[in-house]
């Protein structure tokens, strides 16, 4: 079925987005937003901009990693067809 990979990515994105709001120092996203030099005092709609960016970075990065693992695992499980010559 087509689109399963997209569903896996969206679920992973949402999970890591929520986890990052609970634990803002989750690696990769916090490292990237720290390297960008974003001031942690800046607020937008009641959230720290650094936390928002960290959550988005973590959602995208970990979502892509989980999507790749899902894709490669799915391909390795498919039965190989033999061509008759």
Image (cartoon, rainbow, N blue to C red):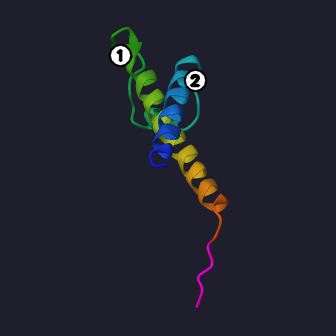
Most distant residue in the bottom direction: 85
Give the residue drawn at x 45%, y 35%.
57
> Are the residues tagged 1 and 2 within 8 Å (C-beta)?
no
- Find out whether residue 13 is within the magenta segment: no
Residue nearer the viewer, 4 or 63: 4
Residue 21's place in the image compared with 13, above or below, is above
Q: Mark 1 to mark 2: distance in Å?
A: 21 Å
Task: Please state the horizontal and vertical placement of residue 62, each as a whole percent of the image.
Answer: 54, 40
Question: Which is nearer the eye, 83 or 38?
Answer: 83
Say which residue appears at 46% left-offset and 38% top-offset. 60
Q: Quarter of the image containing the C terminus?
A: bottom right
User: Which of 40/62 is in front?
Assistant: 62
Residue 27 x/y as whole percent: 58, 35
Q: Secondary structure at mark 2?
A: helix
Quarter occupied by residue 39: top left
Q: Is residue 80 above or below residue 42?
A: below
Q: Which residue is mark 2?
A: 19
Residue 85 vertical placement versus 27 (above, below): below
Task: Rate crowding at label 1 as few (under 14), some (14 to 19) or many (20 or more) other CA atoms within 10 Å.
Answer: few
Residue 38 picture location, percent across and down: 38, 28
Q: Quadrant of residue 42?
A: top left
Instruction: Look at the numbered disc 1 and give the secondary structure of its residue.
Output: loop
Magenta stretch in the rendered image: 81-85
Is the stretch drawn in magenta largely helix, strand or loop?
Answer: loop
Question: Few, some or many C-alpha atoms within 10 Å of disc 2 (few <14, some 14-19, many ≥20)?
Answer: some
Which residue extends farthest left? 44
Sequence-wise, the earlier of marks 1 and 2 is: 2
**Which residue is rendered at x = 64% and y = 54% of the image?**
73
Residue, x 61% and y 54% (percent of image)?
74
Which residue is disc 1 drawn over? 42
Residue 75 sits in which quadrant?
bottom right
Q: Percent x, y for residue 11?
A: 52, 32
């Amino acid at each position: 079925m087509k689109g399963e990979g997209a569903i896996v990515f969206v679920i992973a994105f949402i999970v890591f987005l929520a986890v990052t709001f609970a634990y803002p120092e989750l690696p990769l996203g916090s490292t990237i937003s720290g390297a960008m030099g974003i001031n942690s005092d800046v607020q937008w709609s009641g959230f720290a901009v650094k936390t928002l960016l960290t959550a988005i970075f973590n959602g995208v990065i970990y979502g892509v990693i989980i999507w790749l693992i899902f894709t490669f695992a799915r391909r390795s499980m498919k039965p190989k067809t033999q061509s008759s010559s």
